[in-house]
Image (tube, rainbow, N blue to C red):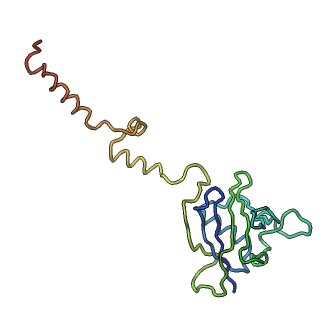
């Protein structure tokens, strides 16, 4: 069975990409699900894959919402179309768009073809991850619970976090300043 290896780049950062291997007889719907999983998207939204050329222009569309291929339809079915049916060039390109409202766009490029599948590997298979995936909803990367643990561990309040500085040593500095000014309290307030 033919194994196709694709590199999927996030449109906004070409240093963020995933390499996915898929069997040629698997469908574009399988590929769509693998891309969602690889980029940590929930898969709850529709997606489209477009044939493309070297200039990344949008060609024929394959949609996750279309269930049957019909002649002259605006979009064809991901469910019914095997990936190998559209691979005709050694560097075949596609554009993958997830969630029609947010329009997460990824550039997909064929980077390898193999005749041998790896035993015990379930395809589609995520081969490589580079860069942090974009956050589908909100901010990604810092868990709010972890921030609370750090605040508690170092006894940081919200004011300290906003300024970026703590209050450590402030009391010591005031005591040192009083001693340098002649120590009024020590001599009974002589002037």
Residue 28 location in percent, x, y? 74, 71
Quadrant of residue 44 within the rendered picture: bottom right
Position of 102 relative to 41 (above/below): above
The image quadrant that residue 191 belongs to is top left
- Res. 65 image quadrant: bottom right
Q: Residue furthest front?
A: 55
Name the residue nearer the viewer: 116 or 125.
116
Farthest right residue? 72
Which residue is drawn at the image coordinates 33% and 38% (left, top)? 166
Q: Find residue 111 and report its horizontal and vertical position in percent.
A: 65, 75
Residue 78, x across and y down, in percent: 77, 69
Left or right for 75, reference 159: right
- Residue for point 75% across, 63% down: 55
Quadrant showing the N terminus: bottom right
Figure check: 162 above or below 21: above
Please state if 43 lies on the left or on the right of 186 as rendered.
right
Q: How many numbered dots are placed on residues in this image?
A: 0
Q: Horizontal placement of 98 versus 85: left or right?
A: left
Give the residue at the far top of this rendering. 191
Q: Name the residue: 72% across, 80% down.
A: 24
Q: Residue furthest left?
A: 187
| Residue 150 placement (x, y as % from top left) | 38, 48
Q: Could you tell me which residue is drawn at 57 percent across and 84 percent down?
A: 120
Q: Nearer the viewer, residue 148 or 83?
A: 83
């Amino acid at each position: 069975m033919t194994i196709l290896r694709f590199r999927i780049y996030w449109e906004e950062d070409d240093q963020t990409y995933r390499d996915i291997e898929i069997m040629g007889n698997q469908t574009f719907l399988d590929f769509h699900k693998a891309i969602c999983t690889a980029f940590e998207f929930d898969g709850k939204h529709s997606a489209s894959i477009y044939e493309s050329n070297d200039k990344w222009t949008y060609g024929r569309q394959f949609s996750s919402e279309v269930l049957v291929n019909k002649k002259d339809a605006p979009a064809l079915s991901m469910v019914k179309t095997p990936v190998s049916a559209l691979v005709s060039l050694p560097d075949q390109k596609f554009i993958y768009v997830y969630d029609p409202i947010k329009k997460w766009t990824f550039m997909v490029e064929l980077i390898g073809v193999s005749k041998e599948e790896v035993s015990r590997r379930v395809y589609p298979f995520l081969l490589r991850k580079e860069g942090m995936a974009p956050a589908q909803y909100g901010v990604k990367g810092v868990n709010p619970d972890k921030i609370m643990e750090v605040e508690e561990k170092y006894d940081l309040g919200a004011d300290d976090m906003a300024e970026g500085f703590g209050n450590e040593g402030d009391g010591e500095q005031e005591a040192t300043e009083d001693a340098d000014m002649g120590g009024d309290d020590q001599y009974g307030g002589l002037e």
